[in-house]
Image (spheres, grey):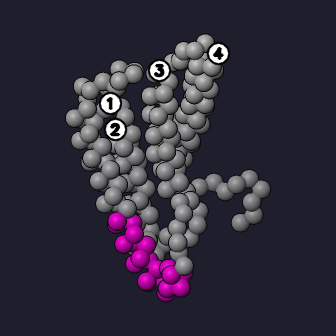
Amino acid sequence: MTKIVNLYFSLLKLIIVLCMLSMVVMVFGNVVMRYAFNSGITVSEELSRWLFVLMVFLGALVALRERSHLGLDLIIKKMPPAGRNTCLALGHLMMLFIAWLVLSGSWQQAQINLNVAAPASGLSMAWFYGVGVLFGVTAIPVIAYDLVMALRGQLPQGKPDYLPSPQGAKP
């Protein structure tokens, strides 16, 4: 199961790279077209925005799994282990609630906008809101796993043990 999860998150990282590459090519191409030929590719602006939103949500998922979001643990570090685990559990419950809100709201918006076409590309706007659905479906199990580990008192600080360590790093 760990291999499948690692493969999934490696795929997400690849998609992030492809989003960035596509955005650079489309925006640079559009700038060149406007400067050199006094024209542009209208759809490139819209697709660049969509890819940026996709890249941000996928990047948030990768950072969530690797526990690399910014955090302030000044108070938690000074607490005894039971208090630390309680605070972590409460934080994870709040994150689960927010992830559920993102998932349910994005699902509703995708359904509402299923037959609404985007202005430049003509694609269904449900694709745009589907990114939030993907985020929620992926984030909820990650947060739930970390919540269970926090309740058991086994949530390590820093990078999780199920991630490969950087090459050349000493344990």
Check disc 3: other Cα within 10 Å, few if <14, some if 14-19, many if 20+: few
- Residue 125 has which mark? 1
Question: Which residues are the magenta region?
Answer: 75-94
Task: For mark 2, give the secondary structure.
Answer: helix
| Front position in the image: 122 or 63 | 122
Let me know if residue 138 is in the magenta part: no
Does dot 3 land on a helix, a strand or a loop?
helix
Residue contact at pointers 3 and 2, CB within 8 angstroms: no
The residue tagged 4 is: 36
Point 40% across, 46% down: residue: 135
| Earlier sequence position, callout 1 versus callout 3 | 3
Instruction: Give the amino acid at mark 3.
Output: Thr
Residue type indicated by callout 2: Tyr
Helix, strand or loop status at disc 4:
helix
Q: Residue at x 24, y 25 (%)?
A: 115
Image coordinates for residue 63, horizontal then vertical, percent: 53, 54
Disc 1/disc 2 C-alpha distance (Å): 7 Å
Horizontally, is 93 left or right of 168 in the view?
left
The image shows residue 13 at horizontal and vertical percentages of: 56, 41
User: Which one is closest to the eye, mark 1 or mark 3?
Assistant: 3
**Figure check: 168 above or below 76:** above
- Up the image or down, 11 lies above or below 28; here it is below
Residue position for label 3: 42
Residue topped by disc 2: 129
Q: Is residue 85 visible?
A: yes
- Residue 89 on the magenta span: yes
Location of residue 34 in the rendering, given as x and y in whole percent from the top left corner: 58, 19
Instruction: Give me the residue at 44% from left, 68% from top.
Output: 149
- Quadrant assignment for the C terminus: bottom right
